Image (cartoon, rainbow, N blue to C red):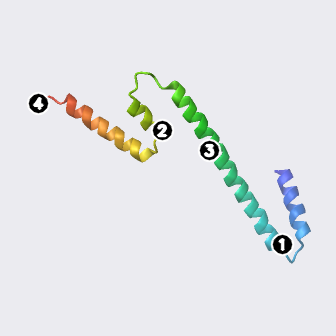
């Protein structure tokens, strides 16, 4: 934290009092952009690692349609799970 405070003080000190607001805005903007890019990069790395491990850990007994659904966004995956549950329930129901 000390390093950040020192660099911010030095950065704003070079801007001068007349441009302190601009210097502060630039400082805040660079922090936000840096944080956003950091989250995006780390998220992409985690997603890539997750997908590769999911493929490697997928049992052979899992049907190909279910395995493919694991890589879909949440909405279609939820719909596929719901439809599979309905099919299983109708297959397991005993007629009166």
Residue that badge 3 annotates: 43
Please name the residue shown 91% across and 67% down the image. Answer: 14
Q: Where is residue 63 in the image (x, y as percent from the top left)?
A: 38, 28
| Nearest to the observer: residue 29 or residue 83 | 83
Mark 2 vs mark 3, CA separation in Å: 16 Å
Q: Position of residue 66 (x, y in %)?
A: 39, 33
Which structural element holds mark 2? loop
Mark 2 and mark 4 lie on one chain; the one further toward the N terminus is 2
Mark 2 near mark 1, Cβ–Cβ under 8 Å? no
Depth check, mark 1 against mark 3: the one in front is 3
The answer to whether residue 14 is above or below residue 32 is below
Which structural element holds mark 3? helix
Mark 1 vs mark 3, CA separation in Å: 34 Å
Mark 2 vs mark 1, CA separation in Å: 49 Å
Residue that badge 4 annotates: 95
Residue that badge 1 annotates: 20
Residue that badge 2 annotates: 71
Mark 2 and mark 1 lie on one chain; the one further toward the N terminus is 1
Q: Where is residue 37 in the image (x, y as percent from the top left)?
A: 69, 52
């Amino acid at each position: 934290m000390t390093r950040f405070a020192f660099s911010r003080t030095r950065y704003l000190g070079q801007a001068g009092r007349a441009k302190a607001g601009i210097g502060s805005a630039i400082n805040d903007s660079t922090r936000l952009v840096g944080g956003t890019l950091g989250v995006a990069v780390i998220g992409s790395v985690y997603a890539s690692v997750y997908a590769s491990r999911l493929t490697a850990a997928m049992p052979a007994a899992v049907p190909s349609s279910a395995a493919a659904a694991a890589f879909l966004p949440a909405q279609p995956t939820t719909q596929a799970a719901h439809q599979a549950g309905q099919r299983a329930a109708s297959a397991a129901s005993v007629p009166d």
